[in-house]
Image (cartoon, rainbow, N blue to C red):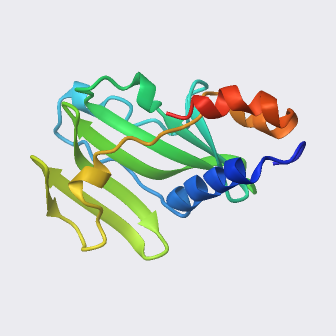
Amino acid sequence: MGGHALGSRALGFVFTISLLLQGLLTACHTAGEPDAASLNCHLETPPADSGEMAGEGGQLRIYPRSTEMPPHYSGCQTAWAEDRSTHAWIVMVQTHYLKGSVTELRTIDSLGEKLCRYNHGTRVEGPRRCPSFKTANGREASLPPGCLETLAHSAQDENVPCLLQYQ
């Protein structure tokens, strides 16, 4: 992260989050769905106001931030990682919600591509390694835009406001 070293608790936090997101790629399938249900599902790059997280070797972006998703949100929440060699953003994980409930989770990890589908609180399609509905229905938390820069270049006591906004 450069700059000043983070405390071990903050570093452990960042490391844990990066492990959760590492190696996941996806695309959102929205064919035949109403426009409202495909909100944010076709973004190729993260918008400027995307949330941030530190990942192994780079930065992760999450859009929309969980704080911006209403309880009955219909659309996708996407996490991207920056490919440092090409400076391109790669979709890592995308969760599709309909009226606040996850309907599809697409990822690619070290075991390959994974598509998990859910209906009314139950997994209806996908391999055993699909997360439970409760886990899949969670929203990816992130830091506000600019917090990674603050964490990298400020004294530890200045980091607290950013870390408190992890949502």
**Rendering quarter of residue 165:** top right
| Residue lying at 47% horizontally and 68% vertically, measured from the top left | 109
* Residue 83 visible at all: no
Q: Residue furthest bottom?
A: 111
- Label count reads 0
Q: Is residue 62 left or right of residue 54?
A: left
Front in this rendered view, residue 155 or 82: 155
Instruction: Give the image location of residue 14, x and y in percent.
Output: 64, 51
Decide which of 23, 163 is in the foreground and name it.
Answer: 163
Which residue is more in the foreground, 105 or 153?
A: 153
Tell whether 7 sits left or right of 60.
Answer: right
Q: Position of residue 101 (x, y in %)?
A: 20, 39
- Give the x, y percent position of residue 48: 61, 25
Q: Residue at x 50, y 39 (%)?
A: 44
User: Which corner quadrant of the image does residue 140 belong to?
Assistant: top left
- The residue at the far left in this view is 120
